[in-house]
Structures are given as C-alpha cells and as structure tokens.
Amino acid sequence: MQLFFFKSINLSSMEVFFDENESYHIIKVMRKKKGDIIKATDGNGILLEIKITSIKSNKLIGLLLKKMNIKANKHSPDIGICIPKKTSRFEWFIEKATEIGIRNIYPIISHNTEKKKINYDRCKKIIKMAAKQSNNFYLPEIKNISIFKDFVVKKQKGFIANCSNIDSKKFNEIKLYNNPLFLVGPEGDFSDFEIEFAKKNGYVSINFGKQILRSETAAIYICSICNNANNFNL
Amino acid sequence: MQLFFFKSINLSSMEVFFDENESYHIIKVMRKKKGDIIKATDGNGILLEIKITSIKSNKLIGLLLKKMNIKANKHSPDIGICIPKKTSRFEWFIEKATEIGIRNIYPIISHNTEKKKINYDRCKKIIKMAAKQSNNFYLPEIKNISIFKDFVVKKQKGFIANCSNIDSKKFNEIKLYNNPLFLVGPEGDFSDFEIEFAKKNGYVSINFGKQILRSETAAIYICSICNNANNFNL
C-alpha cells in the first residue's frame, strides 16, 4: 500500500490534515477518492490508517481509523559523508540510504573534498520520495554541512572508513552499537592526518577488505550491513 | 595503484601485451612512460606487476616482473535481476555490484518486466571501469537475457527476493553457500505464480524485513551482505 506524509492531527475531532503538495499527490497522481482508505506517516515512526472524508480544491482531510507506533531500527546508522564531486552520486546515495535505512546524513568537507555545496531542497524531495517508495516510517534528516575537524571534535565516537590498512579493522570485525556513526571519505580518501586526528578523538579506523569503494558505494554498503544487523531483532 | 587489463602474456619472453584501447588509456590518459611500473589483471584473478618496455603508436608492451594469483571471494553472488525500466538504474547496479563484488549478472525477463533489451557494449564498459576503479581482479560476466521460467528450470538452487511475507525468510536467517544465486524482482515484484514456481524448483523465498527495496537497491544490498560474509575469511 502506498505511503503518504500527513501534516497534523486534531485528536479531539480525529481529523488528519495534509499539506497542499501531498494532497495534490494523493488526489491527482494516485487518484484517491472520498471514502478511500490510505496509509500515512509523520516520518517519525507514527503510522496512521485514514479514511478520506473531504476533498476541497486540493485540500484533503481524513478520519483517523488507526494509529500505530513503529519501532525504529536500532542500528540505523548516522553517516558523515564527504560530499562527492558529482551531484548525481550524492543524490543516488541519499535515495538508496533512505530506502535501506539511515538516521542522519551529515555532509562533510574534508581536506580532499572539492565540492562544498548541496541543494537541500532537492535532497529533501529525494528523501521523501524514497521513504514513500520503500515504506519507511522514519524520514532521515540531512544536516548542515560540517568541516571535518569540527565534526570529529563535536562527535567523539564512531568509525572512520578509509583505504588504509594500518591499524584498521575490517567491517565485519567491528561491533555495531545503537545508531553507529560512520565517516566516509572523499575521492582521494581521508588524509593520514585526518585519520590520525579521528583516532585521537575516539574513532575506530575501518576498511572494506581488498576493495576500494567509491564514497557513495561505501555509504550504501554500510547502510546494508547495519540494516541486516537490525533485522536480527525484528 | 591504478589497475589495468592486459590482453596476453608470452611466458617464454616474459612480455605482456595490451590491446589498443587499454594502451591508449595507459599512455595518453594515465601518462605512463617507458620504465614505469604498472599493475594489470586479466579479470580472472591473475595480477601482474609489469615494467613498461616499449611504446609504439599506441601499442604498449611490458616486461613481467611478478605474477600473483588472487583468490576469489567464495561468497561472491550470482544475481538474476529483472531488467529495470530505467536504463540508468540498471547501469548504476552494474557499476556498484562490480565495485562491491558480484560473479555473474543474469538479466531476466519476468511477468512484470517491461524492458526487454540491454546495451551489452555499454554494460561491459561500465564493468571494466568499475573493476579498475575498485581494484577488483575478477571481472563479473553479464550473461544473455533469460526468460524467468527457463532460468529457474535451468538453475535449480537459489534465493528469490520478493516483498511477500508468506513462507519467506529474512535475509539474515539464510545461510550463504559458495557463490549463492539470488533472483531479484522487477517493479511490481514477482507474481505469486512465479514465487511458487521458483519454490517448487528449489528456491528459498527471502525478504528484507519491513522495507520495500527497488530492484537495483535490493541487488546492491545482497552484494554488500555477501561481500561482508566473504571478508570473514580473508
């Protein structure tokens, strides 16, 4: 069943409201009608079953039939990713990470990061579409851009994925904790200085075995492994 | 170190030859010169260390310095994937699967598969580029297009990934064997008939938990989990 995003609920009247874009999508694109039952989420774990009661000039109101709280996947990762040069690669990562499961996306500028801007509006649209597509009741957040050193000093626990084999663990040797944080390097990898700096600040260096994965591939690999670990506890 | 593909070796003279495209890439794009040492593979597990000895009008010959056999990842999957409607999604899958590790790609036409053609030349180029990029000494093969039923009858052991929860295992409940075979459904999933038909032919139905993954995302998820299992044995 298709998933939509609601805007607000009035619990006393049991009415559920949708914003104009979502109303348009439900009515015009998905051709839902008065009386139809739809599924909607707030993107924060709440899942509603709603009967459409009113459609007036692209404003849709529904009657709340059922309200559920969906448990978050406890291993959903936070990923700090150095912005790839090609926008399409970053957008692809956002789409796939949302499908598979990610909690927060932190775009990072490191020494070898050339691109320093992101189109947030576009990213948020991609996240919303991917969440709908994949039936994901938790909408990942895309945070403000951080400078590598500031980020590492602020968040002092995590894994730094890089291509070095020195004092580095393989991915499957590490123990995932709740919402683990991973840093993923740029084209040209993190610098030796950056890897050392992260280690001094509580980060564990990890690699992916023999392969050298592109930033967006490494990030999706991480999301897949974390999701699979989550499923052990479903 | 950048990886290249060699064409043939003459073991008596220790000479290594490259085809014209690869020679052009080494000389003109990577600006390698006589005397430089490069790394090359046949895409089938052989890794050579070569000293460039002759460059004549885009034909490059090298002297073999060292020859190694790189062990294949025993869990590298074979994936039968229903061709996605959008070419870009299929090409993206090929690139990422090659980076992470896949053995054979079988394009499949199932009941809900709309697209029935593939540009093989373009796919092979993407595979080669991704293998170079990721330092992968095993070049995945992209096989001829198969009809779902014929394929299932021919290869009677594997996993069929789909969105149904009926008599279906979660990905992390299955035991990976050597080069496991996975079937990945199209937009609109496999039909109930197809899932039953596969089960009758020795396939185990699997799903990814709550998420509904797009075909290409599911395929990459599978490659990531298999690669991570491989790494236990590195």
Image (cartoon, coloured by chain):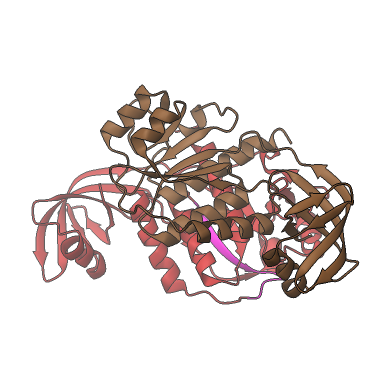
Chain colours: A red, B brown
x then y, percent, for residue A176: 62, 41
Instruction: Tell me: A159 left or right of B63.
Output: left
Q: In the image, residue B149 lies at what x, y percent?
A: 34, 34
Q: Is residue A33 above or below residue B184?
A: below
Residue A9 position in % (x across, y down): 23, 56
| Residue at x 52% of width, y 71% of height | A87
Residue appearing at x 41%, y 52% in the figure? A138
Q: Is residue A111 visible?
A: no
Give the position of the N terminus of chain B as an image quadrant.
bottom right
Q: Quadrant of residue A226?
A: top right
- In the image, is residue A37 part of the stretch drawn in magenta? no
**Quadrant the C terminus of chain B occupies:** top right
Q: Nearer the viewer, residue A82 or B162?
A: B162
Please state which of residues A153 and B64 is positioned toward the viewer in this rendering: B64
Figure check: A191 above or below A32 = below
Question: In the rendered view, does B127 fall on the left or right side of A65?
Answer: right
Residue at image point 56% right, 59% down: B126
Q: What is the magenta range? A: A102-114
